[in-house]
Image: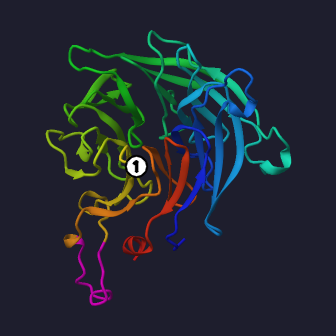
Amino acid sequence: MFGSGACSFPIGSKVRCMEALLGDKENARFLVGTTSLLQPNQPLCSLSQIHVLDYSSTVNEVFVKHVYPHEAQVLDLAPSPFAKDLLVTCGKRKGEAVVATLWKMENVDDDGDIASEGDNPLKPLVAVAELPQQKLPVSKVAWNTGDEHVSAVLASAHGTSLRTWSLENNELAGQDKLELDLSLASGSLGALRWDPHHTNYISYTLGSSIQTWDTRSKSVVFAIEDAHMQTTLDIDYNPNKPHCVVSGGDDGKMKFWDLRHARKPLLTLSAHTHWVWNVRYNRFHDQLVLSSSSDSTLALWRVSSISSAPIVELDEQDFMSESASGADVVDTKIKTYEEHEDSVYAVAWGVSDSWIFGSVSYDGRFCVNQVPSTEKYKILL
């Protein structure tokens, strides 16, 4: 894909979460969860929903593959990295606590010709298992992406505790539990992210800090205090360099860390004018990082100096020259994307195409953009 045009699609409801369908390696497919609450005398289509959206680079257009009803507001979702029909959601019904449920998306690979299915095109979501209630409600869930055969495949955040779970024969079983010492840190658990290089490590945000828990030793092995001004909102692991993470916070900054030497960040970028909701490494090219913000924008960054394979900036004079060096390539914002008009709550790289990415704002606008071809050439050549 070498074009540069953006593609947008209106969901039609408020949205807080979106992810790429990691288990589908053949399609540019995204899941979007809405936050509508069913009111008396409203039709079924007024329910919260899980939208399965396919992007076609051939025509630069987004198509609705399926729409699944979800009776509770979708506050978080986590598709399985191993099975494309499995999905965990954190859902909240009016007046009730948030509940995490493992679902099977029926017929997710069938052609979803919405127009031909009449007035009720909604597909069924089949409940497989529900995470047992803890002392505090669940707020986040995360799949262990390192190996589908690890004992703990899921983690869940419950205010001041972290739980891990195994999944066998469609049954969830509790594994380990971490109770946070709030005398040492304030706030509650926020973002969760398993370490792709060490399947027994899981990192989480707690107030302004970032901590990493070892599920084998049952101990916190890394800690970054005051990573951001007041609240660290998101983290992501570098897919190619162990122990390296990026964080985004309420100070509008994006920071890059080596967890082993965390007294100061490797790199700090003034990313946005307001909160940074999401930060995401490209899953193959760790020179490329995305950030999204409540300033209604998302940004694509080049962080060559701390990547596993610094890109080389070439011009006509040194295109064929062996003297071309990546030493002069700066860490910079490649492009700001301004298609949204509300807080951009989520951004995700495509799975089948590593050069595209989706984003969604609170007002329900879903957009697909792509890495500019000039930047793509710098990486590939």
Q: Which residues are magenta?
A: 312-326
* Horizontal relation, residue 18 to residue 333: left or right: right
* Horizontal relation, residue 231 to residue 363: left or right: left
The x, y position of residue 240, in whole percent, is: 37, 53
What is the chief secondary structure element of the magenta stretch? loop
Quadrant occupied by the C terminus: bottom left
Please tell me which residue is depicted at 34% across the width and 60% down the height of the picture: 287
The x, y position of residue 256, in whole percent, is: 25, 48
The x, y position of residue 319, in whole percent, is: 32, 86
Q: How many marks?
A: 1
Q: Which residue is mark 1?
A: 296
Establish if 40 lies above or below 293.
above
Q: Quadrant of residue 330?
A: bottom left
Quadrant occupied by the N terminus: bottom right
Which of the pair 152/306 is nearer the observer?
A: 306
Which of the pair 50/320 is nearer the observer?
A: 50
Question: Is 323 inside the magenta-drawn segment?
Answer: yes
Please tell me which residue is depicted at 44% across the width and 13% down the height of the picture: 136
Colour mode of the rendering: rainbow
Which of the pair 338/144 is nearer the observer?
A: 338
Which of the pair 296/335 is nearer the observer?
A: 296
Question: Is 100 inside the magenta-drawn segment?
Answer: no
* Horizontal relation, residue 315 to residue 58: left or right: left
